[in-house]
Image: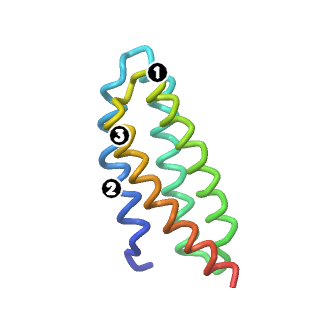
Amino acid sequence: MKQSPIFVKHYDLMLWLIPRTLGFPKSQRGVLARQIQTELFRIHESLVEAGTSRQPLPSLEAADRGMVRLRTYLRLSRDLTLLSPGQFEHAARLTGEVGRLLGGWKKAARR
């Protein structure tokens, strides 16, 4: 499996976001921070499965569903003021890049 841009972008998202969740208040580290971290790793696992599968579409769709959940958790983090507006904007930009790459991969896999 070659290192495609989606793996690099998703890794960048993980590298930036995980330390931010570790800074959440203790009351949210066990709840929202854990959900965000778990979703990041699930998405990564789905991408790896897709990259090593002869039929990547089911794994890509799982990753897409994970991205929807992740975006929801990020909006909730912003609304609970766990992420600043600037941090949320950066996270939204990174998730948008991953989402566009994922959409392109799904489109190619359908052909």
* Looking at the image, residue 105 lies above or below residue 39: below
Q: Earlier in the sequence, mark 1 or mark 2?
A: 2
Q: Nearer the viewer, mark 1 or mark 3?
A: 1
Residue identifier under label 3: 18
In the displayed structure image, the side of residue 56 where residue 7 appears, left or right: left
Which residue lies at the image location 39% right of the left edge and 53% below the top edge? Answer: 94
Q: Amino acid at mark 2?
A: Asp
Residue at disc 3, secondary structure: helix
- Location of the C terminus (image quadrant): bottom right
Q: Residues within 10 Å of mark 3 (few under 14, many from 20)?
A: some
Quadrant in which residue 6 is drawn? bottom left
Front-lying residue, 10 or 80: 80
Gap between marks 1 and 2 measured at Cα: 24 Å
Residue under numbered circle 1: 80
- Please determine whether, in this image, residue 4 is positioned above or below residue 71: below
Q: Would you place residue 19 above or below residue 46 in this image? A: above
What colour scheme governs how the chains and residues are painted in the rendered image of this protein?
A: rainbow
**Which element carries disc 1, helix, strand or loop?**
loop
The percent position of residue 86, horizontal first and vertical second, equals 31, 37
Q: Position of residue 85 (x, y in %)?
A: 36, 33
Local crowd size for mark 2, using a 10 Å CA cut-off: few (<14), some (14–19), many (≥20): some
Q: Quadrant where the N terminus lies? A: bottom left
The single residue placed furthest to the bottom in the displayed view is 111
